Amino acid sequence: MTTNISTRLLYAFVALEETRHFTRAAERCHTSQPAFSAMIRKLEEAAGTRLFERDTRNVTLTPEGELFSEVARSLIAEFEAAFDDMADYVARRRGRVSIAALPSLAARALPAVIAQYRHLYPGVAVTLHDALSDQCLALLRQHKADLVLTAPGANFNEFESRVLGSDPFYLVCRRDHPLARRRRLKAADLAGQELIHLAKSSSVRQHVDILLRAIETVHSGFEVEHLATVAGLVEQGLGVSIVPELTLFQFRQLDLAAIPLDAHEQTRPILVVKRKDQALSIAAQAMLELIEKQIGPIGTRRQPPQR
């Protein structure tokens, strides 16, 4: 059996139960008495029984009306709670947003954004996944992330993406290295240098390979997964490395030199990516706007590192 009872009929029932008077109940519901009486009849027809006893002087609940009162008030409470929850989500007092980002972004650029977001919207839960590009996109595909911050790569056609900023490259080396005295370098200046590489699966390595495709360099034999390992190898004089600006914090703690490559050389675009088939929630849209305001365009907000 399908019952079509509107919340308006439930509110009419409660108004009549509380006032025990058709005229006053109709006034509370902002309708005429004949229209209000018709609403009560419709409700009783849907319930299949009389809910009120009426005479010229009194309006009282029938035994069935007493039972229905509990149901009506429970339904109204659930309805109002649902809309209160929705109002909280719309006002960003509640909700959740999940971000997946490259480790370099997750470690440096995003924490300040998340801290500001939490200050603005303390009731919204924020989740951060730091992962390589393919893993970030997998989280987006699985609906475990709302937004991804990553570098360009394969498998982007199914998503909507736009450039957030550009991450320029730097040579990192020991301070006693001949190139450490240079203020700026061209890719050609790296000819003959012994390079320590990140793994081929990393977005950094893919862009460095493009940068050096016409340059004769020497492979140091080291091809590692983590920037901290690169820093340790460079510190020991086992080679130099080319890394994007966002990763330089990994090298400053060892007091290594970082020399920027000319702006017209290869840079690593940073993209913000979301699903095409689903609009962002209000909470996620607010996070995206803050990311674009605070991070983008990358490469123009920070001062060059000291050498």
Image (cartoon, rainbow, N blue to C red):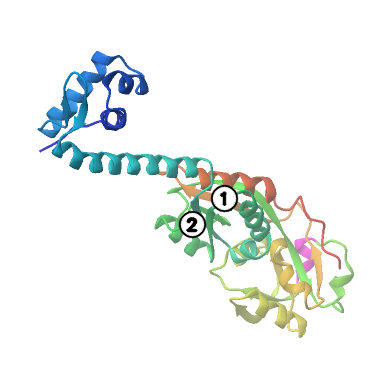
> Which residue bears the numbered disc 1?
272
Q: Nearer the viewer, mark 2 or mark 1?
A: 1
In the displayed structure, 68 sits above or below 94; it is: above
What distance separates the C-alpha of mark 2 from that of mark 1?
A: 15 Å
In the displayed structure, 117 sits above or below 248; it is: above
What's the residue type where badge 2 is placed? Ala
Give the x, y percent position of residue 252: 78, 72
> Which residue bears the numbered disc 2?
154
Rendered-image quadrant of the C terminus: bottom right
Is 188 in the magenta? yes
Look at the image and tell me whether residue 297 can be seen: no
Q: On the picture, is 169 further left or further right than 71?
A: right
Please report the residue visible at 74 percent of the width from the left and 80 percent of the height from the top. Answer: 234
What's the residue type where badge 1 is placed? Val
Give the x, y percent position of residue 139: 45, 60
Give the x, y percent position of residue 263: 77, 53
Please report the residue visible at 61 percent of the width from the left and 54 percent of the height from the top. Answer: 118
Does label 2 or label 1 sit earlier along the sequence? 2
Badge number at residue 96? none
The front one of 263 and 49 is 49
Magenta region, residue range: 186-191
Rendered-image quadrant of the N terminus: top left
* Element marked by disc 2: loop
Please report the residue visible at 18 percent of the width from the left and 28 percent of the height from the top. Answer: 43
In the displayed structure, 75 sits above or below 272; it is: above
Give the x, y percent position of residue 304: 82, 59
The front one of 50 and 19 is 19
Q: On the picture, is 31 further left or further right than 301?
A: left
Using the rendered view, name the quadrant where residue 248 is placed.
bottom right
Badge 1 density bin: few <14, some 14–19, many ≥20, Cα 10 Å: many
